Amino acid sequence: MKRILITGGAGFIGSNLCDYFISKGYEVTCLDNLSTGHLHNISELVLHPSFTFIQGDIRDLETCKRACEGKDFVLHQAALGSVPRSINDPITSNDVNVSGFLNMLCSARDAKIKRFVYAASSSTYGDSKSLPKVEDVIGKPLSPYAITKYVNELYADIFSKTYGLECIGLRYFNVFGRRQDPKGAYAAVIPKFVIQLMNHESPTINGGGDYSRDFTYIDNVIQMNELAMLAKDSHAINTVYNTAVGDRTTILEMTELLKEFLGEYDPAIKQIDILHGPVRPGDVPHSKASIDKAAELLGYVPSHNFAKGLKEAVSWYYENLKST
């Protein structure tokens, strides 16, 4: 079984998955409406004989059905991310992340997809104060985005029990790396700070900088998708896994490390001041994942800790963003 559909395949995570699975000899179909993804992310793949691009929206059921037809696996990455975006526009976030997700589940079921692996989120842990985060212990969601991602897990569980569709959710923890978009109102913190520092602008941290995250490099995420897709043990299927490193870094520590690594290319960056602003509503104070379940059932061993991943990411950012 070699045919994979990757939704959101022109986005940050999706395009990296497309690259990887094409390199492994799979036939890959990318479905993306290009609302947050970009054609330049897949420009090197469009002429590859094993790659197909479908420009379409997961909110359209017929598009989902057409994309799933004849596929063996679905890696569902398409979603509207960002907690602030969901607070500003909960209706669109719900349409894409819940209705679109349900369209994909129904289409995968009808196409007799072997396995449906989907991007879940660490935001599902909500107001739970326990650290590290363990899959079976969650709190109340703190944003509309978090609600949508939890609903995804509930739907996936029902589809596995009711229709026999094999589903695995990967709760991503603050993924970063090559191709993550630094522009726009809802840019993730690392690429946003990178481009500000490269432009000799002071980045603004929301709050004192003591909030912490389990920042997870893209190569770890690729590994988890492959392990989930190919898992043979029945105990490893129809569940969710933390997709993380199993460590945490404060926002202030992350910013200082960014200054250090970027300063190797441009020494003036090391002298840039860091500013502080108000805490964002809906932000989870701390996140650190337990990766024991993924290690035990999937054989997951992260290839990159935070510092190693950030150093590789900074090298890519500097080469690709220095002219922007």
Image (cartoon, rainbow, N blue to C red):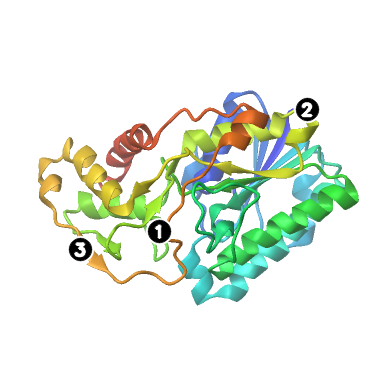
User: Which residue is denoted by mark 1 in the rendering?
Assistant: 187
Left or right: 68 as drawn, with respect to 127: right
Q: Is residue 248 something one can see in this rendering?
A: yes
Q: Amino acid at mark 3?
A: Leu
Q: Secondary structure at mark 1?
A: loop
Q: Secondary structure at mark 3?
A: strand
Tell me if residue 151 comes above or below residue 71 in the rendering. Answer: below
Residue 223 lies, in percent from the top left, at 56, 31
Which mark, residue 1? Answer: 2
Q: Amino acid at mark 1?
A: Ala
Left or right: 284 as drawn, with respect to 182: right
Left or right: 34 as drawn, with respect to 317: right
In terms of depth relative to the viewer, which is nearer, 48 or 256? 256
User: Which residue is denoted by mark 3 in the rendering?
Assistant: 275
Q: In the image as oriented, which residue stretches furthest toward the front?
A: 130
Residue 129 lies, in percent from the top left, at 50, 58
Sequence-wise, the earlier of marks 3 and 1 is: 1
Sequence-wise, the earlier of marks 3 and 2 is: 2
Within 10 Å of the Cα at label 1, are there few (<14), some (14-19), or many (20+) other Cα atoms?
some
Tell me if residue 28 comes above or below residue 137 in the rendering. Answer: above
**Cα gap from disc 2 to disc 1, whole angstroms:** 36 Å
Residue at the (57%, 25%) spot, across then down: 23
